[in-house]
Each structure stands twice: as structure tokens, then as C-alpha cells.
Image (cartoon, rainbow, N blue to C red):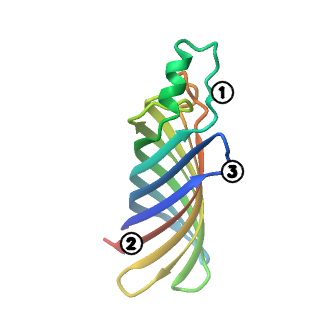
Amino acid sequence: MQVGLNYGFGDEIKNTDYTYTNHYIKGQLYWQLSETKHFTYVIVLQPEINFATHQLLNLYFVTPDEPDFEEKREAFTKLKDIREYVLGVGFQVRYKVTPKFNVYAMGSVGPMITDTETERLSKGFAFSDVFSLGMSYKFKKFSVDFRPNLRHISNAGLQSSNAGFNTANVEFGVAVPL
């Protein structure tokens, strides 16, 4: 078992209708499921807090058929600070390149609470889905990690606004054995 801490940041993937940037701190708790000569299979629990900023640039995303659309356009085109609280659960497959150097793929999903309504996502409950490709290097007592990833957040249609956000992120971390 290992415990770690990661920091990451990213931006919305190619979009001219709005801005969305984020940076985050993520705890990591790694449970090794099994190991072969070259592969290690790991479950990762990831409590996370995201600090995001968002602004609608295309006011016509809010259409006149919505109630109070003019007020919503005015509110949604202002720059917003958003907090997102996530509990991700991931599955990681590591390939041992050398005894100290690993590359891996990881997918995670988890429930999320967002504290701010936007035109793309209702306030409250949502999900965070992440796909990562990464590498780690083990030193004597700890390992360092580099993890580019793609993230999608939405509420799976459980609330009225569900267009969500997609970001490309870069994450750095450190982990120690327990």
C-alpha cells in the first residue's frame, strides 16, 4: 500500500464558446491487487478538490426559450470561481520498464459536488471521469509521478444543465509506502 499527494492543472479542450481552467490537489491511496513479472494491477482511491474558473463567452448558448434567459445570460457571462469536491476510484495497470521506472494507464470515475451553477452544469451532484497515461520513478523511500490526463465532468442527465466540461490536464505527484 502507498499514500500520495498530487497537484494538477488544465484547460478546456479547444472551445471558443466559454473558458474553463482548473487546478487541483488530489490525495492518493494505492492498493495493489496483483503483480506479474511485468505488470502490476492497482486500485486507487482519490479524494480531490478542484479550483476552477469559468466564463460563458457565447451568450447565445442560453436560448430565449429558457425562463428568465436574459438574466441567465447576464449571470453566466460573468467570470465564476468554482469549487469541485470529488471522490474518484481508479484502476491502474502498470508496466515495469525497469525495477525503478514504470509506465501506466489509469481510468477513474467518482461522484462530485460542485458549488456553482453554470450554463453547462447544474450546481450540486455530478461525476468526474478521468483517463490518464503516466510514468513513475521510484527512489529509495518514495516515488515521483508524472500523469497527463483527460477529464470529463457531467451529471449523467440527473439535473437540467448537463453539457459538462472536458479538460486536458497535467498532474505531478509523490507517493510513499505505508
Q: Position of residue 46 (x, y in %)?
A: 41, 54
Q: Nearer the viewer, mark 3 or mark 2?
A: 3
Q: Is residue 138 above or below residue 10?
A: below
Q: Is residue 2 above or below residue 11?
A: below
Q: Position of residue 51 (x, y in %)?
A: 41, 50
Residue at the spot x=53%, y=34% of the render?
77
Residue at the spot x=65%, y=39% of the render?
17
Quick one: SS at disc 2?
strand
Residue corresponding to mark 1: 60
Task: From the viewer's side, name the closer residue of 7 and 143.
Answer: 7
Answer with left or right where residue 45 lies relative to residue 96.
left
Q: Position of residue 98 (x, y in %)?
A: 58, 86
Task: From the viewer's side, name the closer residue of 162 and 62.
Answer: 62
Q: Earlier in the sequence, mark 1 or mark 2?
A: 1
Residue at the spot x=58%, y=42% of the render?
165
Q: Which mark is residue 176?
A: none
Residue at the spot x=62%, y=82% of the render?
97
Q: Position of residue 142 (x, y in %)?
A: 38, 80
Image quarter where the C terminus lies is bottom left
Contact between marks 1 and 2 (CB within 8 A): the answer is: no
Q: Which mark is residue 14?
A: 3
Q: Name the residue type under label 3.
A: Lys
Q: Is residue 158 visible?
A: no
Residue corresponding to mark 2: 175
Q: Name the residue type under label 1.
A: Tyr
Quick one: SS at disc 3?
loop
Q: Earlier in the sequence, mark 3 or mark 2?
A: 3
Measure the C-alpha gap from mark 1 to mark 3: 18 Å
Count of numbered labels shown in the rendering: 3
